[in-house]
Amino acid sequence: MKKIICPSMMCANFDSLKEEVAKLDMAGIDIFHIDIMDGIFVPNFGMGLQDIQCIRKNTEKLIDVHLMIENPGNYIDLFAKLGVDIIYIHPEADKHPARTIEKIKAASKAAGIAINPGTSVETIEELLPMIDYLMAMTVNPGFAGQKYLNFVDNKIKKLVRLKKDYGFKVMVDGAISSEKINELSKLGVDGFILGTSSLFGKNEDYKTIIERLKK
């Protein structure tokens, strides 16, 4: 099964974002992952609109935005117009997540939901027929450099079983090491958001790392 590799651009070198995009693109990544935070849903602030514009201008690869913000339905048109391809929302942050997912689809974008470590599958199961991607957070969202929460593995196993019925792709985000990629891909996980645990800040070039991870 082909692994979908998604660099978390929050961890990139912002002294030369354009060059980072080019290096990652040439290295064979699949989706550029952009974290958007509002300081309310999570206690941090993420990337900005200008960062999305820069990445979009310099790659033809898919771009996703992970909206860690309250009331994401108010901002779907804004992000769609910036040229992203996939929009993730947190159902925990939206009073009417089904309506917001419909809004994403109406904008001709792929719809994803992201769920926190403490969010059960049962609370979002009704949304599964509507989505293209489901991203299981394996750390509490908001900050890079956290430890992987092993108890989420049971939830991931449930999601892999459910994807056979609904057709969405299962993604994971948070402290994803090369060992975790190997372990979770065997369970049936499709895609991996990569930060400092396996991609950024290493002594090897991106191409070498990504070729090894895809194997």
Image (cartoon, grey):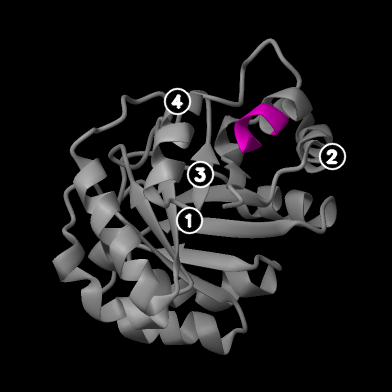
- Identified at 82% across, 39% down, the residue is 18
Between the residue at mark 3 and the residue at mark 2, the CA separation in whole angstroms equals 18 Å
Between the residue at mark 4 and the residue at mark 2, the CA separation in whole angstroms equals 24 Å
Q: Give the foreground label among 2 and 1.
A: 2
Q: Main structural element of the magenta stretch: helix, strand or loop?
A: helix
Q: Give the foreground label among 4 and 2.
A: 4
- Residue 214 occupies quadrant: top right
Q: Residues within 10 Å of mark 3 (few under 14, many from 20)?
A: many
Is any atom of residue 95 visible in this view?
A: no
Identify the mark at residue 179; answer none if there is no mark.
Answer: 4
- Identified at 67% across, 74% down, the residue is 81
Between the residue at mark 3 and the residue at mark 1, the CA separation in whole angstroms equals 13 Å
Between the residue at mark 1 and the residue at mark 4, the CA separation in whole angstroms equals 24 Å
Q: Secondary structure at mark 3?
A: strand
Residue labelled with disc 1: 66
Q: Residues within 10 Å of mark 2 (few under 14, many from 20)?
A: few
Quadrant where the C terminus is found in the figure: top right
Q: Is residue 134 above or below residue 156?
A: below
Residue labelled with disc 3: 192
Q: Give the foreground label among 3 and 4.
A: 4
Residue labelled with disc 2: 26
Q: Is residue 107 left or right of residue 74?
A: right
Q: Identify which residue, 147 or 74, lies in the foreground.
A: 147
- Which region of the structure is painted magenta? 211-215
Q: Position of residue 119 (x, y in %)?
A: 18, 56
Q: Amino acid at mark 1?
A: His
